[in-house]
């Protein structure tokens, strides 16, 4: 975080005037970017700098009497809206609130030249871009690596570091001030083989059949399957019936693997198969919503989804693998754990 290191911010305070109308708001770069700035404050006896980018809006609820007093005074930040009751807007009950504009604090720079990540929720795309311009590497959200990570360069052999709330890093080196551990989950092959044994024949037979099936035949078979099994669900609505096909597929997968595979696909709506099937049943047109899928591709996607569901329901299938902190670790579909002092910390961003 070279651009916001402590000595540079100290120098800006000493050499530049704060923004007009505020005795404590200083620019990080160009003064034209008046929301890309920092604030000086005391934390005990130490001076720290809160680095901000843009604004955020904080909702403050209030009583009816408070709302009327603010409205009478001409405040334009107060709001009155009907409450939602049982899915409908009430004509008798209301909620009263105001929005307070506050600086969007990305982090705090401490006297020991460390940057602390303090965002309450997560760092969005624009905020990640700004953080990247201040550092040697770049910040990105990688769902298969747990969420927000910091990388040095795009080469996969370079450093990969997860970012969590409260984490502090050296502004010069980006090294964290606390040791941490990274764990990923890998499927244990032996446990997986035992768990998936009931699906082996089903997968093998269905895959062979779909490899030899053209799209027109596939859609026609899908239509026949839907007509055959829909009455078993007791649902008139097609989509309500689709949502119940998984349990039927489990029951018939050994005796009718093609039917079962298509039932699974319709429940998951792989490749918008529901729409293509209903279009064929309605007017006889054979179409593909995606254009690139084949029956075999839909089968592969269906198989992957089933396996994921089964694995996640059986945590004993996984083995926990530790990776060297700071070193690259493999992307995975089963989640990432970051541990500090024996406790799991909350990684920013959106993981699996």
Image (cartoon, rainbow, N blue to C red):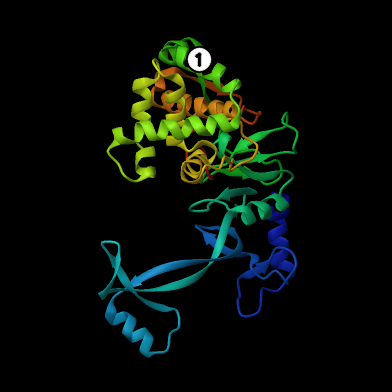
Residue at (72%, 52%) from the top-left corner?
133
Residue 6 placement (x, y as % from top left): 67, 54
Rendered location of residue 202, percent (x, y): 46, 16
- The quarter holding residue 243 reads top left
Which residue is depicted at the point 41% across and 68% down?
59
Q: Residue at x 42, y 35 (%)?
A: 267
Residue 46 visible to the viewer: yes
Q: How many marks?
A: 1
Across and down, in percent, residue 335 comes to 50, 31
Of 24 and 291, nearer the camera is: 291
Which residue is depicted at the point 29% across and 32% down?
Answer: 232
Q: Is residue 82 above or below residue 296?
A: below
Give neighbour class at mark 1: few <14, some 14-19, many 20+ (Cα, 10 Å). Answer: some
Whether residue 203 is situated above or below residue 236 in the rendered picture: above
**Residue under label 1:** 205
Which quadrant of the figure has residue 35? bottom right
Front-most of 52 and 183?
Answer: 183
Q: Residue furthest left?
A: 92
Q: Is residue 336 visible?
A: no
Viewer-proximal residue, 337 or 112? 337
Q: Nearer the viewer, residue 78 or 334?
A: 334
Helix, strand or loop at label 1? It is helix
Relative image position of residue 88 (x, y in whole percent)? 29, 66
């Amino acid at each position: 975080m070279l651009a916001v290191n402590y000595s540079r911010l100290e120098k800006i305070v000493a050499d530049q005037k704060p923004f007009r109308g505020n005795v404590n708001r200083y620019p990080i770069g160009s003064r034209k970017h008046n929301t890309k700035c920092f604030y000086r404050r005391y934390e005990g006896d130490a001076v720290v700098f809160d680095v901000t980018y843009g604004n955020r809006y904080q909702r403050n609820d209030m009583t009816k009497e408070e709302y009327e007093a603010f409205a009478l005074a001409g405040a334009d930040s107060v709001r009155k809206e009907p409450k939602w009751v049982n899915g409908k807007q009430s004509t008798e009950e209301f909620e009263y609130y105001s929005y307070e504009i506050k600086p969007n604090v990305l982090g705090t720079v401490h006297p020991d030249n460390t940057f602390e990540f303090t965002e309450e929720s997560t760092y969005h795309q624009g905020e990640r871009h700004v953080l990247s311009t201040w550092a040697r590497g770049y910040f990105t959200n990688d769902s298969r690596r747990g969420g927000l990570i910091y990388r040095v360069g795009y080469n996969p052999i370079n450093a990969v570091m997860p970012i969590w709330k409260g984490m502090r890093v050296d502004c010069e080196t980006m090294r964290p001030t606390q040791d941490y551990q990274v764990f990923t989950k890998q499927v244990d092959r032996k446990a997986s083989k035992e768990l998936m044994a009931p699906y082996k024949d089903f997968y093998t037979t269905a895959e062979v059949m779909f490899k030899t099936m053209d799209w027109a035949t596939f859609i026609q078979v899908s239509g026949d399957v839907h007509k055959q099994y829909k009455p078993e669900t007791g649902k008139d609505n097609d989509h309500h019936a689709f949502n119940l096909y998984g349990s039927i597929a489990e029951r018939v997968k050994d005796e009718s693997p093609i039917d079962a595979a298509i039932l699974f696909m319709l429940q998951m709506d792989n490749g918008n198969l529901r729409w293509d099937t209903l279009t064929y049943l309605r007017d006889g047109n054979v179409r593909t919503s995606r254009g690139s899928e084949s029956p075999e591709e839909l089968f592969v996607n269906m198989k992957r989804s089933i396996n994921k569901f089964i694995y996640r329901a059986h945590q004993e299938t996984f083995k926990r693998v530790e990776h060297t902190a700071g070193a690259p670790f493999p992307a995975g579909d089963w989640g990432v754990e970051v541990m500090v002092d024996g406790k799991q910390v909350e990684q920013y961003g959106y993981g699996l």
